[in-house]
Image (tube, rainbow, N blue to C red):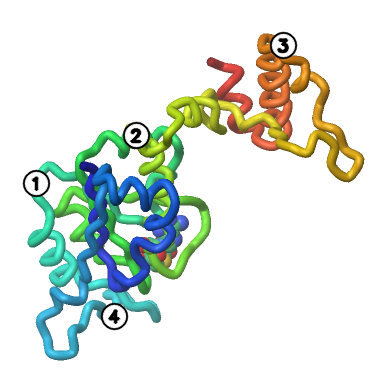
Amino acid sequence: MFVARIFTLYPEFFPGPLAKGLYGKALVEKIWKLETVNIRDYAEDKHKTVDDTTYGGGSGMLMKPDVLAKSLDQNIKSSEKIIYLSPKGKLFNQNLAKKLSKEKTLNLICGHFEGIDERVINSRNIEEVSIGDFVLSGGESAAIVLLDSVLRLLPKVLGNELSNKEESFENGLLEYPQYTKPQIWEEKPVPNVLLSGDHAKIKDWRLSQSEAITRDRRPDLWQKYKKN
Ligand code: SAH
C-alpha cells in the first residue's frame, strides 16, 4: 500500500478532492492511504508556537526548525522520501510523478508564512519540489496537486491501463483534440477521419494534431521532442 504522509498546520484540508472518485475507491481498496501529522502538536510552549521572526530582518515569519524536526523525527522511518513543497524547489513534472509513484511512502511537508528554516532541509535530507513559477500561501494545495498526479500512476488506480499511455506528456507531446456524442453539435461535426474506422489513419491524424498543438503552444517541449 502506498502511504502519503502530510505534515501540515491544516490537517482538515485533507484528503479533500483526493477522497473522491477513483482515489476514494482506491482508498477503500487499500491501494493507498493518507496520514496527516499536525505540526502544531509538536510545539512545546503553552501557546503552541510554530513560527518565529527571521534572522537578518524581513517582515515575515518562519516555521521553527525544532518543532518541524520533532514532528518529522517522530513519524518518519529512515530511508523514506521527504519532500518540502517550495517555490525554490525542482520543478515538478510527469517524470518526477512517475518516480515518486514507485515509493512506498511519501512524506510531504507543507510550508506556511515565509517558509521553513533552511537547517531542517539540510539536516533531514529533504528534497524541495515546486509545482510552478508562482507563489502560494501554503503548501497544502501544492501537496494535493502533486499527489493527484502521483496516485493515478499507481498500479490498479486507473481501471484502463491504456488511459495513462495516451495522455499529454507521455510521449513528450500534448494531447490531440477529442470528441464525443452528439456527432453534430451546434452545427459543428466531429472530424471525419474519426468516423472512418481506419485505425492507422486515426493514429496518424492524432499524432499530427499532437505535434501541431505542441509546436504552437509549447516550443520548449517541441524542441525536446524533435531532438529525441
Ligand atoms: N518565501 C518563500 C515563499 C513562501 S510561500 C519564497 O519566496 O520562496 C509559503 C509556502 O507555500 C511555502 O513554504 C511552500 O510550502 C508553499 N508554496 C508556495 N509556492 C509554492 C510552489 N510554487 N510550489 C510548491 N509549494 C509552494
N-terminal label among 2 and 3: 2
* CA gap, disc 4 and disc 1: 30 Å
Q: What's the mark number on residue 53?
A: 4
Q: Residue at x 32, y 63 (%)?
A: 110
Q: How many marks?
A: 4
Mark toward the start of the polypeptide (2 vs 1): 1
Please tell me whether residue 123 is drawn above or below residue 52 in the rendered image: above
Q: Nearer the viewer, mark 3 or mark 4?
A: 3
Q: Which image quadrant for residue 121?
A: bottom left
Q: Is residue 11 visible?
A: yes
Q: Position of residue 205 (x, y in %)?
A: 73, 18
Residue 4 place in picture, x, y as percent: 26, 51
Judge by depth and name the residue closer to the eye, 55 or 196: 196
Q: Which mark is residue 156?
A: 2
Structural crowding at the residue carrying mark 4, measured as other residues with C-alpha within 10 Å and reported as few (<14), some (14–19) or many (≥20): some
Could you tell me the amino acid type at mark 2?
Lys
Q: Pinpoint residue 220: horizontal percent, then vertical percent.
A: 60, 32
Q: Is residue 87 visible?
A: no
**Mark 1 or 3: the one toward you:** 3
Instruction: Sort mark 1 into few (<14), some (14-19) or many (20+) by Cα contacts within 10 Å.
Output: few
Task: Tell me which amino acid carries mark 1.
Answer: Ser
Provide the secondary structure element on which disc 3 rests: loop
The residue carrying mark 3 is 198
- The residue pinned by badge 1 equals 78
- Separation of marks 4 and 2 at Cα, in angstroms: 46 Å
Q: CA distance from mark 3 to mark 4?
A: 66 Å
Query: What amino acid is labelled 3 in the image?
Result: Asp
Which residue of the protein is positioned furthest toward the bottom in this rendering?
46
Tell me which residue sits at (46%, 30%) in the image: 160
* Residue 210 % position (x, y): 67, 26
Residue 119 disc label? none
